[in-house]
Amino acid sequence: MTRVSTFLSWLSAALLSGFNGSDHTCSEIILRVAATSQNVIFAKQPDPTNEQANLDFVADLWKGSPPELAGTTEVTGNFTLSATYCLPKSLPNPPTLQILVHGITYNKTIWSGLGFSPEKYNWHNHANTRGYATLAIDRLGHGLSSSPDLDPLLTIQPQLHLEILHQIISGARSGGLHVSLGKKFNRIIFTGHSYGSLLGAATANKYPLDIDALVLTGFSTSPNFATVAGAKWRSAPAIEPLRFGHRGHGHITMSDETERTDSSYGGRYDRAIAAADFKYGDTVTTGEFGAMFTMLTPAAGYKGPVLVVTGVDDKANCATPAEKCREILRKTGDEFFPNVRDYEFIAPQETGHNWMVHESAGATAGRVHDWLDRRVRGKVEL
Ligand SMILES: *[C@@H]1O[C@H](CO)[C@@H](O)[C@H](O)[C@H]1NC(C)=O
Ligand SMILES: *[C@@H]1O[C@H](CO)[C@@H](O)[C@H](O)[C@H]1NC(C)=O
């Protein structure tokens, strides 16, 4: 054998062992992030001790009247975030990190398939198998990143999420999150779901150099909030005092299982997942809902690659038949990313809003990582 072919066979063996197994190591970590944001002040603020007042505040939004604003206020602090951090076992120094950001009424566990069949539904597993490191955060106020001293109306707003994400990305690039991540990353992929996608587009707009590729899922610019708006929302501590007694009435959630399943599932999925999804659902804050409309502006500042992944049966973001969904996703690129040349979308069939826990998840994971491999990872740095 010549030297070159020895090298090549060694390389292909390394690639095979690196990327074909489902071998990865995950750890639960804590990120301490110093961040400052300009949060919005609402002209009329619901009484935090009154459940109905908080529900009314949100109901007005759905009726098409976003709350009136009365300026902004600086929020600053050191925030403690919980995250799941996974590395491919056979590629200890992956150059690229995917930051996974969940939507409202979910937390980081959606990226672990809510604990169901890891080979099918665990996004870390899919990504790590393809050589990407993953970091799924619990956004402030969600999962284990929640604490009673965080004001759900005035503090937990998208503006602050965005600055925290910017700090996490900067830290991952510079090694500033060294204590927790143990390494620096050369490339960052922002992978969002639903509200997390909105934050991804906003981050790309405000901090275009933060992101090498944007994967926005459960997302479009033609949202249809009918199912969500008509749903029976309740304050989380009122209906689930054991789990959410420490959160105020400004944390709300869906109280009806059929409505929840309808809004997040469609097509082919395991009913047991939808049942667990309802039983263990997380919350959304009045501040996240109230300030959401300030994030609905096109990401004109961003020019990098964008992939949108939205199921055909995602009632809030697409429409059947498939061709109609594709039309919506085509328009989403034109409307939201006017300066992006490399825009593509995937519209998995028989798939609802929580696409990563539907039957099509494995096939979608393959397509997303094929797309990423061509753009971001490029040459593997062994
Ligand atoms: C955050 O922590 C750092 C280091 O302990 C400290 O210097 C800084 O003043 C803190 N910032 C805020 C806003 O509390
Ligand atoms: C995060 O979500 C999971 C799955 O839905 C749930 O079991 C868990 O209780 C949530 N965590 C918190 C702290 O609410």
Image (spheres, rainbow, N blue to C red):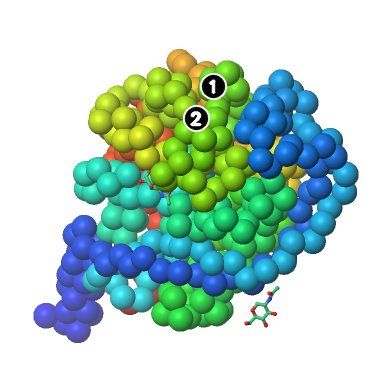
**CA–CA distance between discs 2 and 1?**
7 Å
For label 2, the crowd category at 10 Å Cα-Cα, with few meaning under 14, some 14 to 19 and many 20 or more, is many
Secondary structure found at label 1: loop
* Towards the viewer: 155 or 137: 155
Check disc 1 and report the residue beneath it: 231
Q: Residues within 10 Å of mark 1 (few under 14, many from 20)?
A: some
In the image, is the residue at mark 1 within 8 Å of ligand 2 by its beta carbon?
Answer: no
**Sequence-earlier tag: 2 or 1:** 1
Q: Is disc 2 in contact with disc 1, using a CB cutoff of under 8 Å? A: yes
- Name, please, the residue furthest toward the top: 321
Depth check, front residue: 328 or 51: 51
Residue 3: % across, % down: 19, 84
Tell me: 340 left or right of 20: right
Residue that carries the numbered disc 2 in the rendered image: 254
Q: Which amino acid, by three-letter code, is at mark 2?
A: Met
User: Looking at the image, is 287 positioned above or below residue 213?
Assistant: above
Q: Quadrant of the N terminus?
A: bottom left
Residue found 46% across the figure and 81% down from its top: 179
How many dots with numbers? Answer: 2
Q: Nearer the viewer, residue 65 or 166?
A: 65
Residue 13 in percent (x, y) is at 17, 70
Give the image quarter of residue 7: bottom left
Question: Of helix, strand and loop, which one carries label 2?
Answer: strand
Amino acid bearing label 1: Ala
Residue at 51% of width from left, 76% of height from top?
177
Residue at the outermost left position: 1
* Residue name at image x 82 percent, y 37 percent: 44
- Residue 59, numbered label: none
**Taking the image as drawn, is residue 100 in sight?**
no
Position of 264 relative to 28 (above/below): above
User: Residue 326: x, y in percent?
Assistant: 51, 26
